[in-house]
Image: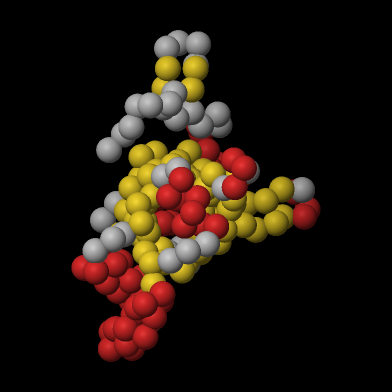
Amino acid sequence: MIHIDEYLPTGKGYMMFREMRKRRQLIPSEESVEILKSGETGILGVLGDERYPYTVPVNYVYHDGKIYFHGAKSGHKMDAIKSCDKVSFCVIEKDDIVPEEMTTYFKSVVVFGRARILETDAEIRHAAKLLGLKYNDNEAFVDSEIEREWNILSCVEITIEHMTGKEASELTDMRKLK
């Protein structure tokens, strides 16, 4: 769901999110989703204390158009989400430095969305199981870990409002040669 409460002035009316400046480096949305599915760690960006940006790496899972991650029930991350549900989330798939070209061959996805701390046992269990099975395919073990951590476990769901994938121009050029 797109919330239309804050816009960026563009000179031609208003828009919710900026268009990517180097559009030729835009990764197709299907490939961006694949990067989200295969990534292991994402960087969560929230509006932290005193309105300072706060970023933190988190393990996550992408499922049915949403991102889920877990954490403790209290702390900077959860306080920030309670205060402002707008977040950004970045996953880097490729980050290869090419010294002889003085560049980096990269692929990444940036997501903007709304975070919601899950409240019901069913929601938390579902998210925790999805997350656990992404990193360990032993279902019995995942279930036992969820039970072991249950009293301190919190899960968050990010509903994606905007997503942009970008790659190095050199990778874009290589893609065109195929």
The answer to whether residue 176 of the structure is visible from this angle is no
Q: Quadrant of the N terminus?
A: top left
Residue at the extreme left of the image, as rendered = 122
Report x, y in % for residue 113.
39, 43
Tell me the residue at 52%/62% (across/down): 75
Report x, y in % for residue 141.
33, 88
Tell me the residue at 57%/47% (across/down): 48
Color style of the picture:
secondary structure
123 relative position to 31: left or right: left
Residue at the extreme top of the image, as rendered = 12
Q: Nearer the viewer, residue 78 or 176?
A: 78
Tell me the residue at 43%/56% (across/down): 35
Asked if residue 86 is positioned above or below residue 89 in the image, the reply reads above
Rendering quarter of residue 157: bottom left
Q: Nearer the viewer, residue 39 or 83?
A: 83
Report x, y in % for residue 56.
57, 58
Tell me the residue at 62%/57% (across/down): 95
The answer to whether residue 8 of the structure is visible from this angle is yes
Asked if residue 58 is positioned above or below residue 89 in the image, the reply reads below
Q: Nearer the viewer, residue 121 or 166?
A: 121
The count of marks equals 0
Report x, y in % for residue 55.
58, 53
Q: Nearer the viewer, residue 109 or 69?
A: 69
